[in-house]
Image (cartoon, rainbow, N blue to C red):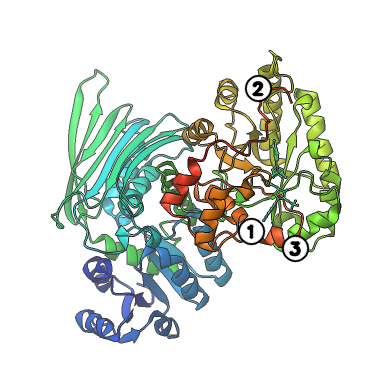
């Protein structure tokens, strides 16, 4: 056995008391050294109960102790990021309870802090360390049950006493709390990109999900379904777990429970060549998963092995949870969106249409100085050269910017699309574009061949994507009946669709379709080209929050999970439009804004002549 690691525990949570600390106590190479609580009394009681050497009032005090080498963090989900980063900056290795973050961007920042400090950060999913899971992975990998057809699993709990799980702002809810077990189990066994997600959930009056049902389809054809829920009854001791994996040659069925201890019995049935079934029963002895988890982390800290739950796996799982939460309408406003390929899109971009007519490149430079990192342009705007100039003369590097352009519909078809792309790159002084969109599906509403041209251009988009010349490919002003025929031939699904979207013109039918297809909507004219700014209803709502009308209009879209590209000419307005993350519109106001009569429409429509 290698040297012993001195552990500190931040918080006196139930999971720490009943599961993790008892597991740590028996773990080889782990020394229970310090415990911190919000009150010294509680910390002292844990010290006595488990034999910690030190008890601290407050988490900062524990992190300041140089003797502590690793910390275990079982705090409410919403403060994981804050304390994980503090602990890493204090030079500690960190094991943090699941889900470690509220969304993928937060999690990426946490892993970056780990890298910057040269420390190990691992998400705590004790059950993934159980011999049962390793055995099951072995069976799946050996091909004994063939290719996975589907997995069905559930984690449903009865009552919860009043704690963070019942509060949205604290990162509560069944999907975060127990749905994450189901997603990690599924992702441990199916290694293929996700093709589509269907999900629904019952949200309580606080917007927290109590019961969710999720269906996943993977690119390799495998499917998975799970149910996750909390507060489904009154008996706190009871819960229901289910797990079933079906393959082309057999299945694994078990009375497996996610955090079970003791002997686990599970059956494997393998079809024989003659079609008969051959039943075998295997037993796996499950030692304390929490002990195994600590021991693995200690070995990783000593450099003997890599963390069992990798950064890549945690991010993949968080991305899936993000997408499920989006689907069920749980979305909290995000400062950035992350595509499946890991590309990050800032939620607020600078809309550059007509922006350079008075002050040229200076206005783009102002936008960059104000903090805009996503710049929305198009070959049609005629300002790509000015943007290219502003970017090269700015103080930030190309990597820090997200530059998006569009191909005008008269440039559809293979040769013209390629030419348009190269022209955009030349003018923007860049080798690659962060995003490229087909600006409109057609120029002439009577063009019967529009889809052929779009398909040809899309093929070029796919090639550019595969060559790494464009990081995100998508559409603009495509409605469901334009997207469907494209999907029939597309190899790569469009990742975004930029549409005119603002209070007064929300195109709900298109939005519902995009959500279903997993295509991210982006709002152009998010302020309704200033027409909506004067709206009385908006003024009423804005005065309640002490915000400007423009901020309410932008906040509304962001709360609905839609990135925006407002255009503004002055630095004051540019800043005002970025300052929309410090308040939350109520459910009632979101409803009011969603039901305004149509107003502020630009008059542009993909099927009408422009
Ligand atoms: N994909 C497409 O087909 C498509 C179509 C149209 C637009 N777009 C993109 O979407 C971007 C934005 O759309 P948009 O320019 O049509 O409309 P918008 O962003 O909804 O509105 C811009 C107008 O609002 C004013 N404004 C901005 N911030 C304000 C604030 N804080 N208070 C009061 N007024 C404010 C601006 O005035 P000042 O400029 O005077 O500050 C401008 O007149 C475009 O620039 C373009 O990048 C895409």
Q: State how far apart marks 3 and 1 are (Cα).
A: 12 Å
Judge from the rendering whether residue 536 lies leftward or rightward of residue 237; answer left or right. Answer: right
Question: x, y (%) of residue 219?
Answer: 48, 32
Question: x, y (%) of residue 60?
Answer: 43, 82
Which of 66 and 365 lies nearest the eye of the viewer? 365
What is the quadrant of the C terminus in the image? Answer: top right
Outermost residue, front side: 536
Query: Badge 2 is on which residue?
Result: 607
Question: x, y (%) of residue 142?
Answer: 36, 37
Q: State how far apart marks 2 and 1 are (Cα).
A: 33 Å
Query: Badge 1 is on which residue?
Result: 578
Query: Badge 3 is on which residue?
Result: 369
Neighbour class for label 2 at 10 Å: few (<14), some, many (≥20)?
A: some
Tag in front: 2 or 3? 2
Residue drawn at x 63%, y 39% is 600
Residue drawn at x 30%, y 71% is 28
């Amino acid at each position: 056995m290698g040297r012993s690691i001195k552990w500190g525990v931040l918080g006196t949570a139930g999971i720490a008391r009943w599961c993790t600390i008892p597991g740590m106590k028996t773990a080889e190479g782990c020394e229970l050294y310090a415990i911190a609580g919000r009150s010294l009394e509680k910390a002292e009681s844990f010290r006595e109960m488990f034999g910690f050497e030190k008890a601290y009032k407050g988490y900062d005090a524990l992190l300041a102790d140089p003797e502590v080498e690793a910390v275990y963090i079982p705090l409410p989900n919403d403060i994981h990021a804050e304390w994980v980063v503090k602990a890493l900056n204090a030079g500690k290795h960190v094991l943090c309870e699941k889900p470690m973050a509220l969304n993928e961007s937060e999690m990426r920042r946490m892993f970056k802090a780990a890298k910057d400090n040269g420390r190990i950060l691992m998400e705590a999913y004790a059950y993934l360390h159980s011999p049962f899971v390793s055995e099951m992975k072995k069976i799946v990998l050996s091909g004994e049950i063939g290719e996975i057809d589907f997995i069905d699993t559930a984690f449903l709990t009865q009552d919860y006493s009043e704690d963070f799980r019942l509060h949205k702002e604290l990162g509560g809810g069944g999907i975060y709390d127990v749905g994450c077990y189901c997603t990690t189990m599924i992702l441990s066994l199916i290694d293929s990109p996700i093709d589509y997600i269907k999900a629904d959930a019952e949200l309580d009056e606080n917007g927290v999900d109590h019961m969710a049902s999720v269906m996943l389809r993977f690119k390799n054809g495998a499917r998975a379904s799970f149910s996750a829920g909390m507060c489904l009854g009154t008996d706190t001791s009871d819960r229901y777990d289910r797990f079933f994996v079906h393959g082309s040659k057999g299945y694994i069925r078990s009375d497996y429970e996610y955090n079970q201890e003791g002997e686990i019995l599970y059956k494997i049935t393998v079809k024989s060549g003659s079609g008969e079934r051959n039943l075998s029963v295997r037993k796996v002895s499950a030692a304390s998963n929490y002990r195994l988890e600590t021991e693995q982390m200690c070995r990783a800290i000593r450099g003997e092995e890599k963390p069992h739950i990798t950064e890549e796996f945690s991010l993949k799982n968080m991305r899936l949870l993000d997408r499920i939460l989006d689907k069920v309408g749980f979305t909290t406003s995000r400062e950035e969106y992350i595509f499946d390929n890991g590309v990050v899109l800032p939620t607020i971009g600078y809309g550059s249409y007509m922006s350079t007519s008075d002050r040229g490149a200076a206005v783009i430079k102002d936008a960059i100085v104000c903090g805009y990192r996503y710049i929305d342009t198009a070959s049609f705007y005629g300002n790509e050269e000015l943007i290219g100039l502003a970017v090269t003369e700015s103080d930030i590097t190309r990597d820090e910017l997200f530059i998006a352009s569009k191909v005008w519909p008269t440039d559809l078809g293979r040769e013209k699309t390629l030419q348009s792309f190269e022209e955009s790159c030349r003018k923007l002084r860049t080798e690659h574009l962060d995003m490229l969109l087909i600006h409109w599906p057609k120029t002439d509403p009577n063009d019967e061949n529009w889809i052929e041209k779009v398909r040809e251009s899309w093929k070029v988009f796919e090639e550019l994507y595969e060559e790494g010349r464009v990081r995100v490919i998508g559409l603009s002003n495509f409605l469901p009946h334009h997207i469907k025929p494209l999907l029939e031939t597309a190899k790569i699904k469009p990742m975004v669709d930029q549409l005119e979207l603002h209070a007064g013109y929300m195109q709900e039918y298109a939005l519902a379709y995009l959500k279903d297809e997993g295509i991210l909507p982006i709002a152009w004219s998010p302020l309704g080209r200033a027409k909506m700014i004067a709206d009385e209803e908006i003024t009423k709502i804005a005065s309640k929050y002490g915000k400007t009308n423009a901020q309410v209009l932008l906040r509304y879209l962001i709360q609905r999970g839609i990135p925006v590209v407002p255009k503004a000419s002055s630095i004051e307005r540019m800043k005002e439009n970025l300052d929309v993350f410090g308040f939350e519109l109520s459910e009632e106001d979101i409803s009011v804004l969603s039901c305004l009569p149509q107003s502020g429409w630009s008059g542009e429509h993909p099927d009408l002549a422009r």
